[in-house]
Image: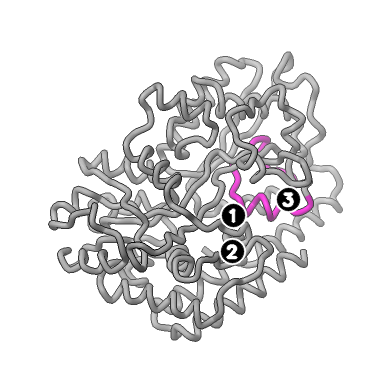
Amino acid sequence: MKVKHIVQTASVLLASTLLLGACGQKKASSTKDGDDEKVTIRFSWWGADDRHKATNAAVKQFEKENPNIAVKTEYAGWDGQVEKMATQMAGGTESDLMQITYDWYQTYNADGTGFADLNAYKDIVDLSGYSQSMLAEGTTKDKLLAIPYSNSTHAYGVNQTVYAKYGVDVSKLKTWNDYKDAAKKFPEGSYPLMITSFNEITDYLGQKYGKSFIDASGKVSFTASQVAEGLKWWQSMVDAKVTPSMKEVMENVGTADGSSVKEVVNGQYAGFAAWSGNMAAFNQVLKDGGMKMTIPSMPRIKADGRAGSMQKPTMLFAISKDTKHAKAAAKLLNFLLNDPKGVKTLGVTRGLPANTNAAKILEKNGQVDDVTKMAAEYQQTTKGINQSPYYEMSQVLEAYDAPMKAYGLGQLSADEAGKKIVTDVKDAIKQIKNQ
């Protein structure tokens, strides 16, 4: 996906919008919206089919209980969401209530005015189930501008059915070398893991050096030679047939959501790297196919070494600062986060909620399946490294993703790719800060 200069594009579009005047912009929130008058609000998110179905069902329930509020839902897979968000934020056409990423929070909220202050709606949105540290993730200059649905740690799930078929004991997988040994038992064309992105290299470097690729201030923590080490490690996993090559990944996976990839569904790729909050989607597709998944401990360089896995707040919810109907949007948000009907309908399609009240509702209702419990336990017991909000910004992602792909296709050496990644990432962050 080509996403270069998204923020610059957004800035240009925003300037054009301002020149055109208030056309397309939303006015300040009504004091009565969602109470007496009939209003329509928009709600946007991304995800896999299980999330779409559950969220749409929850919205229908909300509309039934709030007949004066109509909700227009806008949802899709991840592909194209970055460009869509940039265009909408630049033109003032973003949804009233929106699911956002941690990097979007930073991109569109650098000065603390990018979204509505939810503190103004504490009489509508119950925050009693959230820790102060969790709410701090969505707070800028004492303004609560987003609420994280959950916290997530990078993890490696495996298809336990396939591993057992090939005589691999999942409980003994502790190190990366253990996965290399497991690969020897897999037939040609099948792989123990699908590790396809720079995220896995970031995990490895975090294990080795005990720090994030980019720190909270936007400083690149690794040298070009250290990044080259990570690339060479990843290539060693390809050579050992732990994971398919870059060429095969680009042909079979592309930009698709990992849980929908045919080779994952049929067990050919018997393991996958994903955020802990997204493991439910993988579990569902494998369960539908009569297979069982599990989440082993984070594979390490040494069994007693540091985990080094990335962690971040995930799927934050924010309300547009320009919405006409902030109260109605806040009511929908509270329904999704706190109302037993909304909570039960959403289930664990966004992972186990960070809201302890909601988590207890799901547990009491028997909706926290074994994999979600494993994901929550994995997150609680795996000492991760906080990911910088700059890490997933579009220009930064492109800066490390393109050279990695070029290396994987044999177009750059590890040293060349490492140097290019560090240089390009630094340049991208500099451009972002200069906006």
Task: Choose mark 1 or mark 3, whichever is in front.
Answer: 3
Q: Which residue is mark 1?
A: 82
Left or right of 199 in this view: 161: left
Q: Are marks 2 and 1 in contact (CB under 8 Å)?
A: yes
Q: Are marks 1 and 3 in contact (CB under 8 Å)?
A: no
Q: Which residue is mark 3?
A: 109
The amino acid on which the numbered mark 2 sits, given as a three-letter code, is: Val
Which is more N-terminal, label 1 or label 2? 2
The amino acid on which the numbered mark 1 sits, given as a three-letter code, is: Val
How far apart in space, not on screen, are marks 1 and 3 (Cα)? 15 Å
To which quarter of the image does residue 127 belong?
A: top right
Which is more N-terminal, label 3 or label 1? 1
Quadrant location of the C terminus in the rendered image? bottom right
Tell me the residue at 59%/54% (across/down): 82
Q: Write the start and end of the magenta stretch as one range.
A: 91-111
Where residue 353 sits in the image (x, y, percent)? 50, 35
Where residue 359 sits in the image (x, y, percent)? 47, 30
Nearest the viewer among 298 and 18 is: 298
